[in-house]
Amino acid sequence: MTTAPNQSAGMALLEWYDRHGRSLPWRTRQGEAEPYRVWLSEIMLQQTTVAAVIPYFERFTARWPTVEALAAAEDDDLMTAWAGLGYYARARNLLACARTVAGQGFPRTADSLRQLPGVGAYTSSAVAAIAFGERVPVVDGNVERVVSRLIKLGVPPKTAVATVTEAVEAMLPDERPGDFAQAMMDLGATICTPKSPACGICPIRGWCAAAADGSALDYPKKLPKRAKKTWHGVSFVVAAPGGRVLMRKRPPKGLLGGMLEAPGSAWGEIPDNPFAHAPLAARWSEAGSINHVFTHADLTLSVFTAQLPRPMPVKGCEWYCAQTPVATLTRKVLTRGLATLTPEP
Ligand code: SF4
């Protein structure tokens, strides 16, 4: 019989964190961290790995060292700096949130932080605990996995939020709630990993029901998978001398909202007549297709290219340097299209 997770488990975890916690650019040890850096890192980390976030975090904080500086950024500059990090609604909310708090500072509790644009249950608790020392449970995907194994949760953790939260609360030490939150995240990221939990060196093994009977890999229970949609579309890569390419901005709302893209069709059924979506009349060459995976849909875009003798005005589009930072999908389209064009002499 194992003991249910309790504050002793939380203290054991803190001791482990002091020796083995990850060193990350937005972290400070002991005491309150800077709210701007905590908030920025937590928004960037939503749906994105630590390794992918680090260079973006460093560039953002070098260019916009305070929330006031970020609030004064031009929308386009921020979207360009965010390009490649994905989930672009986060970037729009980032700016809206910065403009809300600039000059007055971040609110200090999870409840009030949650009122800000783009700040949900997880981010508000993480910022409150890490930046302001509020004693609140912080539950992300890593923590859900750890808790599911600790208590052998028989249902998917997303369907048992209260049970998971209670288990974390039971472990929460009286002091250092921010370090405890980060310790849980680190344990999930480095020890209690999805496919190979290292129970032998886990600091809270003594409280873990799944480790006791060797069933860690049976948890967390999974939600049934939703069938993914399949989308098709067509994109046109138009190049001109001087390394210029034709792009347009996507509508502000929706997938990749406000980001640059090569002109083309909407995404859905295979277009009947691809050339009806071309931005101009030109001699098009076929450049093959690219695939892109969204959370809920797989997209295949057929790419056509044309080389113009000079950049000419095209309605709804503008000419950009081909190296302009763009979303990963657009980079795939441009790379595919430009590879088939004869390089300029
Ligand atoms: S003992 Fe194993 S399953 Fe339990 S929390 Fe630690 S790593 Fe995860």
Image (cartoon, rainbow, N blue to C red):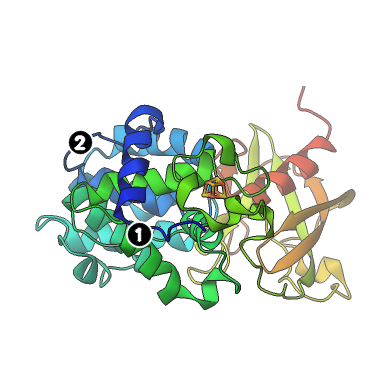
**Which image quadrant for residue 97?**
bottom left
Q: Is residue 311 visible?
A: no
Q: Residue 57's spot in the image, x, y percent?
A: 39, 38
Q: How many marks?
A: 2
Q: Is residue 104 above or below residue 185?
A: below
Q: Is residue 328 above or below residue 115?
A: above
| Residue at the limit of the structure toward the top, as seen here | 345
Query: Disc 2 marks which amino acid?
Result: Gln
Query: Disc 1 marks which amino acid?
Result: Val
Q: Nearer the viewer, residue 237 or 134?
A: 134
Q: Is residue 106 left or right of residue 306?
A: left
What residue do we see at 41% from left, 61% from top? Answer: 139
Q: Which residue is disc 1 drawn over?
A: 138
Distance from label 1 to label 2 (Cα)?
A: 18 Å
- Determine the secondary structure under disc 1: loop
**Which image quadrant for residue 128?**
bottom left
Going from the N terminus, do you reach mark 1 or mark 2 first? 2
Q: Residue 142's spot in the image, x, y percent?
A: 50, 53
Any mark on residue 314, and which?
none
Q: Which residue is disc 2 drawn over?
A: 30
Q: Residue 271's spot in the image, x, y percent?
A: 84, 73
